[in-house]
Image (cartoon, rainbow, N blue to C red):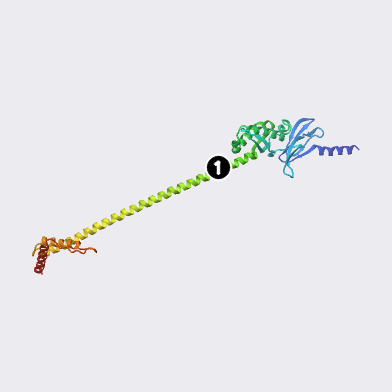
Amino acid sequence: MLLSILVVLAILYVIKGVIIVQQAEVVIIERLGKFERVLESGLNFIVPFLDSPRGISWKVIQKGIDGSSYSYIKEKTRIDLRESVYDFPQQNVITKDNVSIRINALLYFQIIDPKSAVYEIQNLPDAIEKLTQTTLRNLVGQLDLDETLVSRDKINHELRAILDEATNKWGVKVNRVELQDIIPPTDIQQAMEKQMKAERDKRAAILEAEGLKQAAILKAEGERQAQINKAEGEKQAEILNAEGDAQARIKRAEAEGNAIKIVIDAIADKGQPDKYLIAMKYLETLESINQGQNNKVVYMPYEATGILSSVDGIKEMFKGTK
């Protein structure tokens, strides 16, 4: 009989005295209601009937089938040391310009001191939620609606710093805070959409006007450059024509000079070269006067007899030369 009692006691001791703790978990042990020690992961032994794990209340938030969130209190004896994600439900917050908006946030925290998390606060998740809500109301209450919509990073940073400092005595490290949604009232959203549409239309009109202006400027510059190029081309053409005409005149003068020189050399010993030249120029001038389609008048020079005598003289000179 005594042996049976000893066997039962041994079995109860093993059942009550052996605790296996999972990795990244701890268990708070109390002896007769007083804190005794923290059990780490692995195989642990306690004194049955004297030592017992401390139960803690933990608020759990879950989503139902319809998508709505609900919460309940769960009693547990094991504390998870991994980083936890706490999804807060949406809450109404009033901005500095008296606009009521809805905000929900995500909080990433980790328990670094299990003893403080159990003995310094009654329900750690619920306490963190309430603290986050009140801090978020204070921060958003200092900002206008427009500042709130564009200052997510600023709000996240300030909220994390405040929560990390406040939860330090609870043995908690707040690693990150993220605002998921900032939802203004319906009428404010419609007004903002109209404002954004007006801004887009304004930017489009400005860009179109700038494009037309730039096109007109480029067109005017192109026409100006074309006129400049045309004027430069005409100028170069006139210069080349003038240079060509001057070269031609020079060549003609040189040829005429050579011809006159040949004639003078031929008749220098037989006659008077100056009379010959005068007579030739006179005849050329007379020929140019009688040219023209509508010119039907034949001019007779005033000194015709003198010219004829000069021509006869020229004839005689060539005869003598011949």
Per the image, the residue denoted by label 1 is 199
Residue located 57% across and 43% down the image: 197
Is residue 133 in view from this perspective?
Answer: yes
What number of labels is visible? 1
Q: Is residue 181 above or below residue 228?
A: above
Left or right: where does residue 237 sit relative to residue 73? left
Please state which of residues 178 and 55 is positioned toward the viewer in this rendering: 178
Q: Give the percent coordinates (x, y) of residue 13.
A: 82, 37
Left or right of residue 32, residue 109 in this image: left
Percent coordinates x, y for residue 62 in the rendering: 73, 41
Horizontal and vertical percent position of residue 39: 74, 36
Q: Is residue 217 above or below residue 154?
A: below
Identified at 40% across, 49% down, the residue is: 221
Q: Quadrant of the C terminus?
A: bottom left
Image quarter where the N terminus lies is top right
Residue 181 shows in the view: no
